[in-house]
Amino acid sequence: MNGKAWMCGVALAAGLGAAVPAYAQSAAPVDPALAGRIEAAAAAIQPRVVAWRRDIHQNPELGNAEHRTAALVAEHLRGLGLEVRTGVAHTGVVAVLRGGRPGRTVALRADMDALPVQEATGLPFASTATGTYQGATVPVAHACGHDAHVAMLMGAAEILAGMREELSGTIVFVFQPAEEGAPPGEEGGADLMVAEGALNDPRPEAIFGLHVVPGRPGTAFWRGRGFMAASDRVDIELTGRQTHGAWPWKGIDIVAVAGQVVQTINTLAARTVDPTTTPTVFTIATVNGGVRYNIIPDRMTLSGTLRTFDTEQHDDLVRRAGEAVNHVAAAYGASADFRVVQNAPVVFNDETLAAWLGPVLGQALGSENVNPAAPPTMVAEDFSYYQREIPGVFYHLGASADGVDPATSPPNHSPQFDVNERVLETGVRAHVMTALAFLSRS
């Protein structure tokens, strides 16, 4: 999830659409004999998937810089005989597997980038890598699980390539960079993948993706319609007049303005939006300014994130927040520059596909491990850009350690975040079963 996103859950909210019916759809699961073959193949390839995951984990790369990871993926896919295109959206890889018979086209997606996080898992293959972020050298770690995503889709591609002659249709594998957001001043991520033709030639009819999160190992959960929030980056630049800390009246105290702005933003979201209809979070996360304890600076910058599920409500809140920030600044004689940039739209799972996926993942994971009516979550994912182009479903895969309460598992983006490697086999099976079931869908 992107930067753009940190994992947590929220209560089910009214107004986001009814939960999809569990297993009421007509789509037939995969033939039991074939499902057995897939289960055996996923078990057989599991040691290699684990090895890929650990290698990628130990060698993480930030967004738009996933050169080693992309090369590893491309080499593997070419070795499977797939049509491979590299350099999409800087470092993205798109591969096409054409079956022995004509039919539908479906896409499966994984994200490849890591985060500027100092890993503290204590794993023998923990990252000690560094990278450059906003001009500074920073530690880099796969603190969101994208290493697992890449490894699982590599494993699924190998199994599906081995069934090439049996396939009726085409499968597109999308390995995407910069899901956590492109570096400042650069483009990247799913929107650039779309712009550079990741979903063209051939054009998939649908796309599916998954994300590891704290949860009972091997469980899958999602919902139709709005599942993950839209994400906006908010930047506020305040300008006042520098003065001595002992004579605040001789300048414009921009620190006081910043404090009032934070309070105004917090109050605006908490006191003017009904959280039972449209979950909303408006957070100011950074406040920067000043160089010395007794000098009131002339400039301060603030940044934060806005998470919403409703476009009209989002636009109204952005308008009112901009007006409020400018009014606060003006009251002190200061000025404000308020900017909002969208990181990702709402992850909107196609309702029909979301319901259809229930029995498919039920067969792959066990019906007791599947919840197609999960509550929405305030985290975001740029998978939503693909869903603006074609129908798609994004679901979460529980990956907490065995015997650990998911509520106390380190969350995504935590220095302690880790993936239960047992679920890698589960994810491979889910990918393969989803693709095969879609290609045979009537």
Image (cartoon, helix red, strand yellow):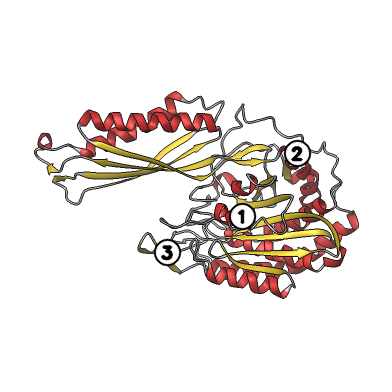
Q: Residue at x 82, y 53 (%)?
A: 439
Helix, strand or loop status at disc 1:
loop
Give the amino acid at mark 3.
Pro
Who is closer to the viewer here, 226 or 359? 226
Work out whether 191 lies above or below 352.
Answer: below
The mark nearer the N terminus, 2 or 1, is: 2
Residue bearing the label numbered 3: 139
Give the amino acid at mark 2.
Thr
Q: How many marks?
A: 3
Q: Gap between marks 2 and 3, in whole Å?
A: 42 Å
Give the amino acid at mark 1.
Ala
Q: Gap between marks 2 and 1, in whole Å?
A: 33 Å
Residue 124 shows in this picture: no
The mark nearer the N terminus, 2 or 3, is: 3
The mark nearer the N terminus, 3 or 1, is: 3
Which labelled disc corresponds to residue 352? 2
Question: Local crowd at mark 1 within 10 Å, few (<14), some, or many (≥20)?
Answer: many
Q: Residue at x 67, y 62 (%)?
A: 152
Left or right for 361, reference 102: left
Q: Gap between marks 3 and 1, in whole Å?
A: 24 Å
Residue bearing the label numbered 1: 401
Work out whether 412 lies above or below 224.
Answer: below
Residue 118 shows in this picture: yes
Work out whether 166 lies above or below 80.
Answer: above
Question: Local crowd at mark 2 within 10 Å, few (<14), some, or many (≥20)?
Answer: some
The nearer-to-camera label among 2 and 3 is 2
Left or right for 41, reference 50: right
Q: Residue at x 60, y 29 (%)?
A: 13
Who is closer to the viewer here, 301 or 42? 301
Helix, strand or loop status at disc 3:
strand
